[in-house]
Image: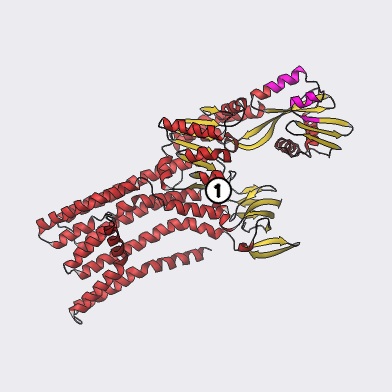
């Protein structure tokens, strides 16, 4: 695998070297003919001119095109300098200049292409064939022939060829190419899997949901390539700089000519002042930053968002699926009249066994976690939105709301009523369990809070976020309990989609830079309006992901901290690149005006600035937000708070 990759790199480098090698051969031939006086002078001059045209054709074409469009660009600089060099009869020096530019351009292209290839190579993770179960047999077919609904068999050590849902089997899957998670994730029936991920252990059967260009892997590549082609607003500064810089340089060249009486000195000034490094300072850094984040499971849709990320002052976050897992969990079992917790839970599981309600699934999950034996009920009746009634072992079992039990004639005693109120204050839903006409227990159910949230919020605060507000459609009591547990600055409850959008608009009217995190269709309007919309990708809806500016492929909002950190780092690197380019230009212009440089040395000096900027930006590919003193202090300060939060969630 590695040798194949190295071979591909060598092939790419050889292709890029064709132009500079051809220019070098022609230029050397011209020099040999002139030095040993072989043939007429016109012949060696013609070889040099051919070298100039062959090596500089792309530059000439782009330069004249920009000039006709009244754009003063780097290519215009190059064309002016080369025309001036050839106009004074310096054909071989002009050819040497073209060779240096071609060689440096090939090196820059190769380095930048490696940056982009780090994302394009993700497509290599997708296998070309898949094992499919058809008519009771397992057959190998090309991935292109797979259809939605096909059952794909993935053996240990094989890559998953489709996006889908596990229907049978269990395994440990390495999802690093998609989510950036370094630790394999356990998969079991009902788990989602992605194309291109590696099944490290266990046999999986996957029902196909997406294939080909519709898979998450293909969308990642498309989004990143699209983002790398967009311009950050700071890049416009480079364009404005170039517009007035050329007239200034022409003036300096005229001054140099007047002082030295040497046309070569004026040409050297034009060549050394070419703002190539300045022009690529922004796009190279943005490309590297976008690629780095994509490899870590954070998709950025454009350079403008990298520029805005570190400026976020207010963060609005949808509760369900973001701060919480979006799935209810039995947090506590309260028993009455001497019944044990396992007995209460077992009765509830028997009654709910045939129910499709989300709360029923959470009750059954709790029963399985305690390894309870759950027999089938003899009879089952569901009252939509209220509860269920079942007959088992000659007893009536009722599980549901307080009103549901009261309508059936089950008395609600004062201790039960008091406990219902207490659980409600903690943001939990109380589900009563009745055996015949007696309430024997209560299940306290709540949406499970992600354990990393409190620390992540504190980290975001250290990165400049002034206020974090939780948005939810839940009852205020539920919202208050979750907000208190995780430590947000405030919350807004019972919101409709338009209300979330209004919250964004109100903050923007105050001049705030607003980030919005969400995962559902109801979050899409707010995500679209926010300065930076951030979607939870793994569990989020397609609408939210398409609408958002940033997608977190791993459902962990610590990715927002990574994004903000990278945003600040890219901006610092752009400024550093600009400083590098300015230093090269100032030194080069100073030496050029005083006649120290020849045209060839001027080009070498100018291209050195470009290569410095490229390498500076490429270093961003391997940058990673580290622990650092601030994070260590944060962990030490927040450890006790996180622990106490978990205790509150567990015990109430």
Q: Is residue 306 left or right of residue 501?
A: left
Single out the residue that lies furthest toward the top.
Answer: 414
Q: Indicate the position of residue 351 as horizontal and vertical percent values.
A: 80, 35
> Measuring 83% from the left and 31% from the top, which residue is drawn there?
397
Relative to residue 16, is residue 403 depicted above or below?
A: above
Vertically, is 602 above or below 389? below
Location of residue 270 in the rendering, given as x and y in whole percent from the top left corner: 21, 57
Q: Is residue 415 magenta?
A: yes
Specify whether 393 is left or right of 71.
Answer: right
- Front in this rendered view, residue 456 or 182: 456
Query: What residue appears at the point 25 percent right and 52 percent down from the top-left corner?
Result: 584
> In x, y percent, where is residue 556?
55, 41
Q: Secondary structure at mark 1?
A: helix
- Quadrant in the rendering for residue 418: top right
Please state the total of marks drawn on the protein image: 1
Q: Is residue 381 visible?
A: yes
Against 636, residue 309 (above or below) is below
Q: Which residue is mark 1?
A: 179
138, 17: nearer the viewer: 138
Q: Is residue 450 visible?
A: no
Q: Which residues are magenta?
A: 398-421
* Mark 1 crowd level (few <14, some 14–19, many ≥20, 10 Å Cα): many
Residue farthest toward the right in the current orientation of the protein: 394
Horizontal and vertical percent position of residue 604: 26, 60
430 relative position to 303: left or right: right
Quadrant where the C terminus is found in the figure: top right
Colour scheme of the rendered structure = secondary structure
- Front residue of this view, candidates 69 and 290: 69
Question: Which residue is depicted at the point 49% across and 48% down?
Answer: 299
């Amino acid at each position: 695998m590695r040798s194949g990759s190295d071979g591909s790199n060598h092939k790419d480098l050889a292709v890029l070297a064709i132009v500079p090698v051809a220019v070098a051969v022609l230029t050397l031939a011209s020099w040999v003919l002139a030095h040993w006086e072989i043939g007429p002078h016109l012949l060696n001059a013609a070889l040099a001119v051919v070298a100039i045209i062959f090596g500089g054709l792309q530059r000439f074409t782009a330069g004249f095109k920009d000039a006709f469009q009244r754009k003063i660009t780097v290519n215009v600089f190059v064309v002016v300098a080369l025309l001036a060099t050839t106009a004074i009869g310096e054909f071989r020096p002009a050819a040497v200049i073209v060779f240096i530019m071609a060689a440096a351009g090939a090196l820059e292209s190769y380095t930048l292409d490696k940056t982009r290839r780090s994302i394009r190579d993700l497509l290599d993770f997708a296998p070309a064939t898949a094992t499919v179960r058809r008519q009771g047999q397992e057959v190998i077919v090309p991935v292109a022939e797979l259809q939605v609904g096909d059952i794909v068999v993935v053996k240990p050590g094989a890559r998953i060829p489709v996006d889908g849902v596990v229907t049978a089997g269990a395994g440990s899957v390495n999802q690093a190419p998609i989510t950036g998670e370094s630790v394999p994730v356990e998969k079991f029936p009902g788990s989602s899997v992605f194309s291109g991920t590696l099944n490290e252990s266990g046999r999986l059967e996957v029902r196909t949901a997406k294939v080909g260009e519709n898979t998450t892997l293909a969308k990642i590549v498309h989004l990143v390539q699209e983002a790398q082609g967009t311009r950050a607003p700071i890049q416009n500064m480079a364009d404005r700089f170039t517009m007035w810089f050329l007239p200034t340089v022409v003036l300096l060249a005229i001054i140099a000519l007047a002082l030295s009486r040497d046309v070569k000195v004026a040409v050297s000034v034009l060549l050394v002042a070419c703002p190539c490094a300045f022009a690529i300072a922004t796009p190279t850094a943005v490309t590297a930053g976008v690629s780095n984040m994509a490899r870590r499971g954070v998709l950025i849709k454009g350079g403008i968002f990298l520029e805005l990320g570190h400026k976020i002052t207010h963060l609005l976050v949808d509760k369900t699926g973001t701060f919480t897992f979006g799935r209810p969990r039995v947090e506590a079992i309260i028993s009455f009249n001497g019944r044990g917790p396992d007995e209460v839970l077992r009765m509830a599981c028997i009654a709910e066994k045939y129910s499709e309600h989300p709360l029923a699934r959470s009750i059954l999950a709790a029963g399985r976690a305690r390894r309870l034996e759950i027999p089938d009920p003899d009879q089952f009746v569901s009252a939509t939105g209220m509860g269920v009634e079942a007959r088992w072992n000659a007893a009536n079992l009722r599980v549901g709301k307080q009103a549901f039990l009261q309508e059936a004639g089950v008395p609600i005693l004062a201790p039960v009523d008091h406990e219902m109120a207490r659980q409600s204050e903690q943001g939990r839903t109380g589900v009563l369990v009745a055996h015949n006409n007696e309430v024997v227990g209560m299940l306290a159910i709540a949406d499970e809070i992600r354990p990393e949230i409190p620390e992540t919020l504190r980290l975001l605060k250290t990165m400049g976020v002034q206020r974090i507000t939780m948005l939810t459609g839940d009852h205020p009591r539920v919202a208050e309990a979750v907000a208190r547990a995780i430590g947000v600055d405030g919350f807004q409850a019972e919101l409709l989609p338009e209300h979330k959008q209004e919250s964004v608009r109100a903050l923007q009217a105050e001049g705030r830079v607003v980030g919005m995190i969400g995962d559902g269709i109801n979050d899409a309007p707010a995500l679209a309006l926010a300065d930076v919309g951030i979607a939870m990708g793994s569990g989020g809806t397609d609408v939210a992901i398409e609408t958002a500016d940033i997608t977190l492929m791993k459902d962990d909002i610590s990715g927002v901290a990574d994004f903000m950190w990278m945003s600040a780092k890219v901006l610092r690197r752009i400024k550093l690149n600009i400083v590098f380019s300015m230093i090269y230009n100032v030194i080069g212009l100073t030496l050029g005006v005083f006649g120290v440089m020849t045209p060839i040395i001027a080009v070498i000096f100018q291209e050195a600035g470009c290569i410095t900027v490229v390498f500076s930006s490429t270093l961003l590919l391997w940058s990673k937000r580290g622990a650092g003193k601030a994070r260590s202090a944060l962990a030490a300060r927040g450890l006790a708070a996180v622990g106490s939060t978990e205790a509150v969630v567990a015990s109430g």
